[in-house]
Image (spheres, grey):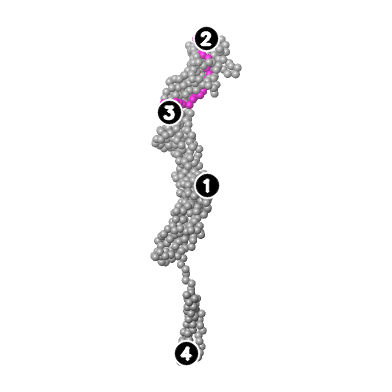
Amino acid sequence: MKKFLSILLALVMVFSLMAPAAIAEETTTPGTEGGEVVDPEPTANPEPTENPEPTETPEVPAITVTVGNVAKTGKITLKWTAVDGAAKYEVYRSTTETGKFSKIYTATGLKLTNSSVTVGEQYFYKVKAIDAEGKEVLTSDVVSGYADCAAPVVTASNVASTGKITLKWKAVDGADKYTVYRGASKDGEYTKLITTAKTSLVNSSAKANTKYYYKVVALSSKTEEADSAFSEVVARRCDCAAPVVTIGNNAKTGKITLKWKAVDGAAKYEVYRATSKTGKYTKLTTVKGTSLTNSSAKAGFTYYYKVKALSAVSTEANSAFSSVKMRVCDCAMVSFNDYDYNNNGNPVFKWKKITGAKSYKIYRSKSENGKYTLLGETTSTTFTDKTAKVLTVYYYKIIAISSKTSSANSAAFRFAATPVYPMAKNLKDVSTSKVTKLKWDAISGVSGYVIFCGYSKNIDEMDPIGHTTKTNFTANGKYNGLWYAVVGYKQLTTDDVIPSMPAYVYVK
């Protein structure tokens, strides 16, 4: 049977080869009649055949895909050109150029933001145009892009104490460092300030009263291709520094004093006061200088202060308030020009009443910087040191004690005093009709006596008329209607003289 089929197949092939020849023989050759061959007449002057113009190669449609990033988030964006006949577009993605592409999106529009990306990674894309029947029309070339770091969100403020500009931002996913740029105008040239791993910066080189513009770039930890776009520009003026205030009391008046160093860029200073730390602060005054004595403060009362530096250029650059300072207004210092002695030669101290004081404490020491011992306390404005000894210099201080709080006690009024010998007792006029004669009781410890004479009972207005080591004195004549004074004295080896209190007698 197989042999028969082979023979039949061979016959079929023979007839198929003979058929064209038979057909050719039956075809009439053009220009013949009745089978006779007729030579064709030659054509006169035949026109030359022109070369046909080459056919233009039709343009092959294409999808142009553009890759970018969203500046704010760093996510990858795709845009592509429209394709005639396309009803939709399919977007495919891979992590390698020749790897497996997976469909991630189907769109009727011409763009896509690929939010499901990892910062710092490179992605490859291609876009397919699909017609209404679901058939592929065209596929784009493969394109790629990196998922960028998001742009930092920057805020600007000022350091209260220094006035310097401070920038802050939250950590950006995928970034390990940040570069900060600064400019003098928003659209001008920016200069790199610093690259830092921190998420904040204090611009210490900023100058008071000057406005600066900043922008920040997040640097990818994987590749610079994934660095962020610039942050939005933030502007800030460098403030004046807050004054650093020291507070105290004027020793003499007890009034509260404020002092501070001059602040760069400041023209004036505002001083505010309150009666409690968190209470309402009222502006006391504006000064050009760097100190203030609060003369309206009352002894025994507590006050709170803060100071602001006012910019010489703009109120925008005024400083923050200084830290709050608290102080009690002291009583004024006790004072007097001189002291006196009683008849026993004891020092007697007198002073004017101090506002806000309930009493006064008197202290004494034998050396200026030695230990002072309390002698006594008095509500009076006078005190007599009855225990002081002649020939000894004593050092004293008097403190006014506040009626409200010990914090308002006055500063110490300091002075030195030396007791003198007591006055001569029993000074008498024992004159005769011819001479003026005086006598008295001896003063223990003195070296001698000086006799004075004058028209008033005031040693300062009398003249010395004699000297004696005895306890009597006789003038060389009769002198009536005058005041006489006897003063004992002690001559020291240092040439100092310690006197006694004067004893007076009137001679008629």
Give the label, 1 or 2, closer to the camera: 1
The answer to the question of whether label 4 and label 3 lie on touching residues, with beta carbons closer than 8 A, is: no
**Mark 3 or 1, which is nearer the eye?**
1
Label 3: state its secondary structure. Answer: loop
Check if mark 4's residue and mark 2's residue have beta carbons within 8 Å.
no
What's the CA distance linking mark 2 and mark 3?
51 Å
Sort mark 1 into few (<14), some (14-19) or many (20+) by Cα contacts within 10 Å.
some
Q: In terms of secondary structure, what is the magenta stretch mainly?
A: loop
Q: How far across and down, in percent of the image, does residue 317 sit?
A: 46, 44
- Name the front one of labels 4 and 2: 4
| C-alpha gap between disc 4 and disc 2 | 194 Å
Q: Position of residue 237 (x, y in %)?
A: 47, 46
Q: Is residue 240 visible?
A: no
- Tell me which segment is drawn in magenta: 404-426
Secondary structure beneath label 1 = strand
**Residue pushed farthest right?**
493
Left or right placement of residue 281 versus residue 142 in this view: left
Say whether disc 1 or disc 4 marks the residue closer to the N-terminus. Answer: 4
First of labels 3, 1 by sequence position = 1
Which residue corresponds to the image point at 56% horizontal and 15% vertical from the top-left?
A: 490
Give amino acid for label 3: Ala
Q: Is 68 inside the magenta-drawn segment?
A: no
User: Callout 2: few (<14), some (14-19), or many (20+) C-alpha neighbours within 10 Å?
Assistant: some
Q: Tell me if I can see residue 150 in this picture.
A: yes
Q: Amino acid at mark 4?
A: Gly
Say whether disc 4 or disc 2 marks the residue closer to the N-terminus.
Answer: 4
Name the residue tied to disc 1.
196
Secondary structure at badge 2 equals loop
Residue 31 disc label: 4
Front residue of 357/320: it is 320
**Marked residue nearer the N-terminal end (1 or 2):** 1
Tell me the distance, in whole angstroms, between the alpha carbons under discs 4 and 3. Answer: 147 Å
